[in-house]
Amino acid sequence: MRIDRIELRLVRLPLVRTFRTSSSSKDHIDHILVRVSAAGGLEGWGEAASPSDPFYCPETTETCWHILKDFLAPRVVGREWESIDELIALFGPIKGNQFARAGLEMACWDALAVRDGVPLAKLLGGTRSEILSGVSLGIEPELGPLLDQVDRFVDEGYRRVKLKIAPGWDVAVVRAVRDRHPELPLQVDANSAYTLGDADRLRALDEFSLLLIEQPLGHDDIVDHARLQAQLATPICLDESIHSAEDARKALDLGSCRVINIKVSRVGGLREAQRVHDLCLARGIPVWCGGMHEFGVGRAANVAIASLPGFTLPGDVSGSDKYYREDLVEPPVLADRGAVTVPTGPGLGHRPIVDRIARQTLRELTIDDGLASS
Ligand code: OSB
Ligand code: MG
C-alpha cells in the first residue's frame, strides 16, 4: 500500500446538549478528519478525536494538526508499507501524540479493510455482531435535569449509565440515581478530580454497588491509584493514565485498577487498542470501549474495536443521536435497545457524507509528496 495524498479537515459539530466534566465544559466538538488516498481511487477515513483544550490530556486539536501536518503525514505520504505494523514503523521516533497518530492510523486501517473487502471489525479480530452500549452523562447545574436524562436513556434501553462526578457532585448525586434505579448497572467517572486525601469520600461510594470508579486520581498516576484501590471495594477503572499496553501491564502489576477503559485515540490507535485488549483478556481483566464524543468516523472505529471478545462491559459508544443532530456518516451509528450493530460491509462500514463534512469544515490541508498545501 502506498498513500499518495492525505487530507486533514478540522470539522466542527454542535452538541445537542452541553457536556460538563470535572475539568471542562463543551457545547460543540472540533475533531480532525483524516482522509488517505491511494492508487485506483482507494481511500480511507480516520478521526483524531482530541479535545480542543488540554484539560483531559496534554494533546489539543492544534497539537494534533501540527503533528499530523509536520511529522506524521510527511513520513507516510509516498512510502510503501504492507501491514499496519509497517505503517506504524514509518512514524519512527515520534513520541506520544497518541490522538494524532490514531487519526492517521485509523484511516490506513480503513483503506486496508476496504482494499481487501473485509469489515474493519473482522480485520481487528472482532467476534460480536453487536456491541452493548451505555451512556456517559455530564455534570448538570441541578439534579433534576440529570435524573430526567437517566430516565430517558434507561427507557431507550441503554445497558448502563455513567455519571461524571467531582467533589460536591458525587455521593448525593449517586444516591439519588441509585434510589430511583436500584438495579441499574451504574458507574462514575471523576476525570482526575480527587486525591488520596479524598479516600473516605470515595469509600462512601462503595455502598451503591457501582460497576467501577473511573480515573479518580491524577491523569498520569498509577501509584496512588494502587494505594486507593487497596482501600476501596469498588473496582477502579483507569482511563487517562493508560496510553499503551505497557502502561496497562504496569498498572495491573501494581494493582492500580481492576478494569480498563480502552479508547482508541488515547492509546494511539487501533493496533495498540488491540494490544491492551489482548493483555487484559489474557489476565482476566474486563475492558470496555470509551469515547471522546466521536463523529461517525471515529465512532465506527469504536464499534469495530468493541466487537473484540474481551469487551465484556457496555461501553460509552452510544448512538450518535445522543450527541449530534446530524452525523457525518451514512448510515448513522445508532443504538437499538442499547445495542449497536457491527457493520458487515468493507472498512468502517459507515460512509462519510462528503458534502456535509465540507459544510462543517473550518480548515483543510492536503499533504502530497511530503509538501503541504491549503
Ligand atoms: O473521560 O471518558 C471520559 C468525553 C470527553 C473526554 C473524556 C471523557 C468523555 C466521556 C464521554 O465520558 C464519552 C462519550 O460519550 O463519547
Ligand atoms: Mg473517563
Image (cartoon, grey):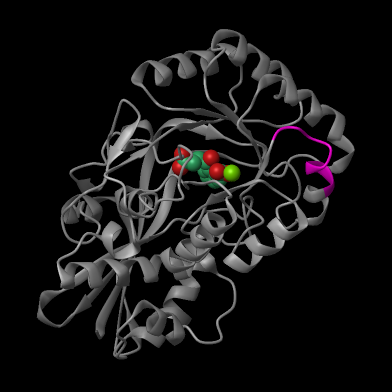
Which image quadrant is residue 334 in?
top left
Residue at horizontal 53 percent and vertical 25 percent from the top: 185
Left or right for 107, reference 213: left
The quadrant of the rendering that contains the C terminus is: bottom left
Where are the magenta residues, as a range? Answer: 227-234
**Front one among 15 and 101:** 101
Q: Position of residue 294 (x, y in %)?
A: 40, 48
Is 80 above or below relative to 333?
below
Q: Position of residue 34 (x, y in %)?
A: 33, 66
Is 345 above or below relative to 311?
below
User: Is residue 94 one of those drawn in magenta?
Assistant: no
Residue at horizontal 33 percent and vertical 55 percent from the top: 126
Q: Position of residue 226 (x, y in %)?
A: 79, 50
Is 22 above or below relative to 5?
above
Which image quadrant is residue 42 in?
bottom left
**Front one among 269 and 43:** 269
